[in-house]
Image: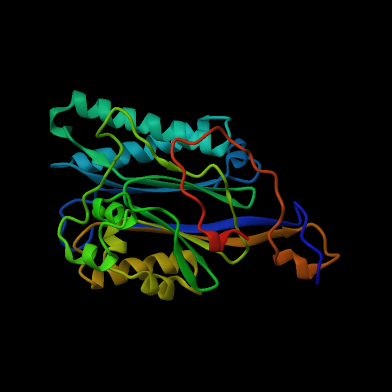
Amino acid sequence: MTARAEAGDTRIRVVGAMRTDIGRLRSSNEDAVVFVAPAEDSPEAERGYFALVADGMGGHAAGEVASALAAEVVRRVFFSLDQPTPQALKTAFEAANRAIFEHAADHAECRGMGTTCTAIVIRDNRLWLAHVGDSRAYILRDGGLTQLSDDQTLHAQLVREGVLTPEEAERTPGGNVILQALGTRPDISPTLWTEGLPLRVGDAILLCSDGLSNLLSDVRIAEIASGRSPQEACERLVDAALEAGGYDNVSVGVFQLEERERRSCADQATTQRIPIVDVDAGPPPTRVIAIPEGLKT
Ligand code: CA
């Protein structure tokens, strides 16, 4: 079989679910989650499917304020902009950073608050990622889980620079120190994909806060999420994190890619292949990490 699927042969639809849980020890839930699946004919449909997880930090209820502001501002600004996806995400993250920073300056009880934010957009059968902090995005493909986000923590940075081995990082305290968060500085430099990752029917994208990824290994996450509906996968993943201790707030999202329609039935064997689609080139990024080589097909 040599034929390739042409643009439009396969349209992917996203079936997603998210769940957030206070956990076993915390007195409040400082995580926030958002999933927007625009109706097919709505003006928002052009912008794509959108989801994020934000993990707030700060004294008293300030972490909740920071993550709620991130969720609200990133979502609203992203959908209000008629820009290429990476540029819209960049603008939305900068707006959220400013909103949190200014709110903290105006409210003494919110001083020093901040939040992680990891956002995905699925559009034209491709995935875009933007993030600040250590909330994670993964792709689950053919039963294997690959992390797409780069943990912006001190230890992850030292491992990337070759100063620590992963094993040494595990043993050294202070690993969760986050290198940047929304709202703690006037300017941020989010990780931003300017190239969309081509997605296939059957792929699932996962988002989570560290309340999940600190307690469940990648292998365990893959085992639990594989073969389950997004809703069931979310429930089982949260339950597993709670059983493993649940000492932090736990948030997770699972977004499954399904075939929506088949425009040509001339060669049904090709409809599982990746369609060729036009991608907005977008402006230069503030910071780019490459799509993992193994996923570039
Ligand atoms: Ca957390």
Q: Is residue 99 above or below residue 132?
A: above
In what quadrant does ligand 1 lie? bottom left
Quadrant where the image shows the C terminus: bottom right
Q: Is residue 138 above or below residue 57?
A: below
Classify residue 179 as left or right of residue 283.
Answer: left
Q: Is residue 34 visible?
A: no
Q: Is residue 11 visible?
A: yes
Q: Is residue 172 above or below residue 129?
A: below
Q: Residue furthest right?
A: 266
Q: Residue at x 70, y 44 (%)?
A: 278
Q: Residue at x 29, y 41 (%)?
A: 181
Q: Position of residue 200 (x, y in %)?
A: 62, 62
Q: Is residue 34 above or below residue 203?
A: above
Name the image quarter holding residue 62.
top left
Q: Nearer the viewer, residue 47 or 200?
A: 200
Q: Residue at x 50, y 45 (%)?
A: 193
Tag count: 0
Quadrant where the image shows the N terminus: bottom right
Q: Position of residue 23 (x, y in %)?
A: 22, 61
Q: Position of residue 170 (x, y in %)?
A: 22, 65
Visual colour scheme: rainbow
Q: Residue at x 16, y 62 (%)?
A: 172
Name the image quarter holding residue 3.
bottom right
Q: Position of residue 150 (x, y in %)?
A: 38, 53
Classify residue 222 as left or right of residue 12.
Answer: left
